[in-house]
Each structure stands twice: as C-alpha cells, then as structure tokens.
Amino acid sequence: MNNAHDIVPTHLAVQAMRDNGYKNAAYALAELMDNAIQAGASQVELLCGERKQQVEGKRRSRIEQIAVLDNGRGMDANVLRLALQFGNGTYLDENKHTGIGRFGMGLPSSSISQCQRVDVWSWQNGIENVLHSYLDLDEIKNRRITEVPEPTAKPIPMIWTKIGQKFGDSGTLVVWSKIDRCIWRTGKAIIDNSEFVIGRMYRKFINSGEVKIRMVAFDLDALYNLILEKSALPNDPGYLIEKTSCEPPFNNQAMFQPWQGDISYEATFTINFREQEHEVKVRFSYAKEEARLIEGVNNPGSTPHGQHAKRNIGVSIVRAGRELELDTGVVNGYDPTERWWGVEVEFPPSLDEIFGVTNNKQSARNFSELLRVNIQSLLEEGKTITQLKEELKEDGDPKSPLLDIAHKIHTQLSIIRGLIKAQTKGTRTSEKRHDPYKPEKVATAVTQERKSQGYKGKSDVDEQLPKEERKQVIKETLKEEGVTETKAELLAATTVDDGLKYTFVESPLDTPAFFSVKPRGGAIIVTLNTNHPAYQNLVEILEEDVDKADIDTLRSRLVNSLDGLKLLLMAWARYEDEQPDFKGRQSPLNRGR
C-alpha cells in the first residue's frame, strides 16, 4: 500500500501517465512492435477482435480486444515483470544499445494510453511453457495491486491461438482489453488507419523482408469469419522503394528519383559524441517527371498517387531503421507542390541525446527545433556556420552538431523546390497565348545579320554537325542544367528544326550568377537562375501578374517586358560567344548576388 507521503503516489501517477503523448492507437501499437522487432521477431501480427453491440438502438461492431503477437525470443519471468514496469526494461544502457528499443516505457505506457488492462503471455521453450502477467488500472486505482504481479503459468486463451499464425518455440502475446481511448471503433478502422503509419515506420524492415506484419480484424463470436486480413506494405515518404502502398501505377515502381545534384543521393555527416564518431545519413529525392506530367491531367496532386503523397509531406526522421516522425518544420504549408520532394535523416540510437529523442520515440526535439529555424537569420554580420556552431557549443547547446545537417536540408530543398517548379513550368495555357519562342527568333535573326557582317562565334562551328547529333548534345546539356527529360527533348528539337540560335530555359542553379551561358550543338543555351533574387523580384513577378491580370493591355505589357529581358540576356550571351579570348568576363548583369 502507498504511503500517504510518497513523492509519487502510484495509483495517481499511473492515471496521469495515460496522457503520455501518443498521437493515436497506431503510434501506441508501434511501441509493442518495437519490442517485437528488438526481440528478433520475423513476423508481427496485429489482431483486432470486435463484437456486435447494441449502440443507439442498432447492433454495431465495436472493438473489444487488440493483440500484438510476435515470434521473437520471448521473456523469462524476471524480464516479463520488468517489461511491465514503467521506466524499466532491458535496453536502458545508452552506451551499449544499438537497436530500436531502449527507454523501457513502451509496453506499459503505450498500453494504458488506449486501454485499462493489458495482459502479457511470453514463452521461450514452447508454448506449453508460457508465463503470464498483467496490469489493470482498476486494481491499481483501488490499490489492490501495488507492484507488477509475479508471472505465473497460464494458458493462452483459445481466441488467440486460433487467430494467430506464428506461435513458434518462443514469442510474446500482448492483449489490450477494457479499451476506452482508441479513437477507432472497429478492427477494420484500426487496421485501415494504422497500416499507413505502421507501413511508414517499419518500411525498411518490411522492404528488406526482415519483418512481415500481418493485420487481422475478426469477430470474437465467429473466429473463422475474418473481417479483414492483409500484410502491411512499405510506405516510403521518399518514394524510392518500388513495391509500396502507393496508388497505381506507383505501387510497383518508384515514384521519385534520387537527387543527383552537387551531392549524391545520400550525404553523410560525422558527429563526434562521447569520444566516438557516429554517422548521420541524409537522403534527398524528388518526383519523376511522369508522376506530374500526365496527359489530360491539369492537377497531378488530385490523382490517387498525388493524394497519397499529400499524406507523406515532411522530413522523415529515422532512428535505427525505424521512423520516429515525419517532421513538417520545413514545409511550406501553403504550397501544394511540397508533396513532390522527400528528405530522410537517419541516425543511430547512440545520438539520442544529441537529437533529443523523446521517451515515446515519436520525435527528435532538438533536431525538429533546428528545422523550424531560419538558419540564415542566425548568421548575423557575416557570421559563418562554423562560428555559429562554436557559439552553440560554448553555450552547451546540444544542437550544435546538428547545425550542418539542418543547414544542408534548407539549402538543398531550395534547389529541389526550384527544380520541381521547373518540371511543369510552361505547361499552363496562359503561358502560351503569345509566341513562346518570339525572343529566340528575334535574337536569331539579329545574330544571322551580324554573321553576314563578319562577326563569328564559337558556337557557329557546330552548326555544321548532323541534326540528330546537335539535338542530342543540346538535350544532354539542358538536362545537366536541371531541365526535365521531356522538356529538354522538346527544346532541343525545336531549336534545331526551327533553326534557332538560342535556347532559353529557367532552372535552379547552384551558383550566385543571374544566368549561365553555354555554347553547345551550334546553339547558345541561356539558363536563367531561378534561385537568384533578381528572378523572384523581376521575372517571376512578371509571370505571376500575367496570369492574374484581367486587362489585355496589362497582360501584353507584362509579356513584352519579359520578352525584352530575354532579348537583353541573349544579346549579352552573343557578346560572350563572339569573344575569342573570353575567359569568364562578367557583365553587371551576371555578377553574384
């Protein structure tokens, strides 16, 4: 019995722990699955038993019991008892542990967040040697139990041996009953809503074949009548896994592609912590062209696969192969194209303290805080990232080692967002109301006149190459500049077939220059840098106003202004092309920011 002056009265503390921050039943169930995977299970089963009840004058199915079964190593009496204690467990040594468990809060805290009673059966040498213990909130509240009941031999109820598949030589069965806080009322609803989250959390385990997650809803009064049975599919927010829960046609093929810019798809950061080096992996991806440019579809976000991606927006923070959360700190909530990029950050449990992992393994607080900060705003008076890191380190701020990672995500996303925007740029009807190649045609005519006067450019030599070779060279150059495959092919063909000297494109460039000039395949490729402030303040605003204007004269003025800017840039491009000894000379237009 509790002492009247206990610092933490057990019966009150356990009630308070029910509000322990689990977002819903899916996240609470994930704690049980963590334990199973940590115990070496190759199959985990979510078993949802419901029963018809009289509700508001009608017989309706209502969830009565939820179980998680695994074929892991099982627990002996001592470990089973520890597993039902709050804050205790066998994975508490942060210096030795490398798996997805550790905090020792999972089983009891997740269970009581959804129900008032949890029963655990576990066995290590055949199911006939099963041990049982439990927690019951009513008994704790009424002080009938003040410690975890000593495990005893008790057979597993027939319900679970009939429904469960993997009762091997060892394993564990956790059963929730007196369910009073689960927001979903039927087994089917629990599975439908949990599969998306659980498939995302354990996507790496499922995709590798290391773990299979079986999900079953059944009627407690008709055990042989399964309401629903399925296996959880991987749900990859980076959309690089081929077989996933995404909608067709991207359920059997990757919808995104790895980023192959100035860094590889996977960037590695090394953090020195407690005199040891630990690696953090950051992975970037973005939508394939065919996921967004679909014939007859004006809004790719409205497609089934677009709606699937809408539910997976954010930075996926992964610890030891298991996702903690999909953090939305860097997401522009107003922009529907945010669904078309993916970022994954994976770190080992040895960095839990640095990342600020919560005891319910639902977030990494320190890293999330950094993602929400505009790091550029912290770099005052020419301060560098290195100097800022040193300041944080001197202040004892654990976020210091994470600064480089957050900064890379912010800067890389800026480039990827520009590329995503460029994928569909030029496809709107409003952008085709005037001749889209008018500036190129005018500039070509002027160039031909100058050539007749004896002015020669470096690009002129390649005009004699075969057409198909010229097209291929121009196409590959455009792709290097970040232009999509389809658009690059169209521009290359138009340039060569129409006899144009110039190809004008817009793309995010990793350079401070306003535009770049490349003579290739007998043409001059001018790429306007969409990351440059002049783009947002001049070109982009002109284009947006053109789309929104209601007065024809205003629209015409804006379009002509943009054409004039292109002509100006092309004039400078030809000037560079005509200089035989040109070695990177810059005009005021082409200087850094």
Image: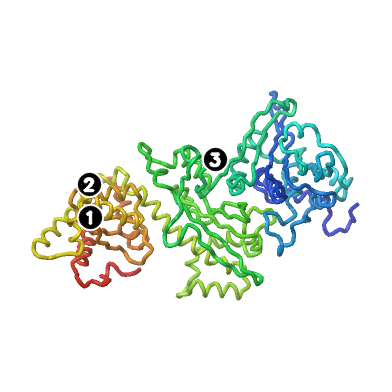
Q: Position of residue 460 (x, y in %)?
A: 18, 60
**What's the residue at 80%, 44% (across, down)?**
122
Screen quadrant of the C terminus: bottom left
Cα separation, mark 1 vs mark 3, equals 46 Å
Which of pointers 1 and 3 indicates the residue nearer the eye? Answer: 3
**On screen, 387 above or below 523?**
below
For disc 3, the marked residue is 245
Residue type for callout 2:
His
Q: Could you say which disc has been placed on residue 434 in the image? A: 2
Residue type for callout 3:
Ser
Is residue 53 or residue 12 the one in the foreground? Answer: 53
Disc 2 or 3, which lies upstream in sequence?
A: 3
Q: In the visual, does 300 lie left or right of 505?
A: right
Q: In the visual, does 529 lie left or right of 316?
A: left
Location of residue 592 by image quarter? bottom left
Residue type for callout 1:
Asp
Location of residue 112 by image quarter? top right
**What's the residue at 38%, 38% (across, down)?**
297
Within 10 Å of disc 1 (Cα), the crowding (few <14, some 14-19, many 20+) is: some
For disc 1, the marked residue is 563
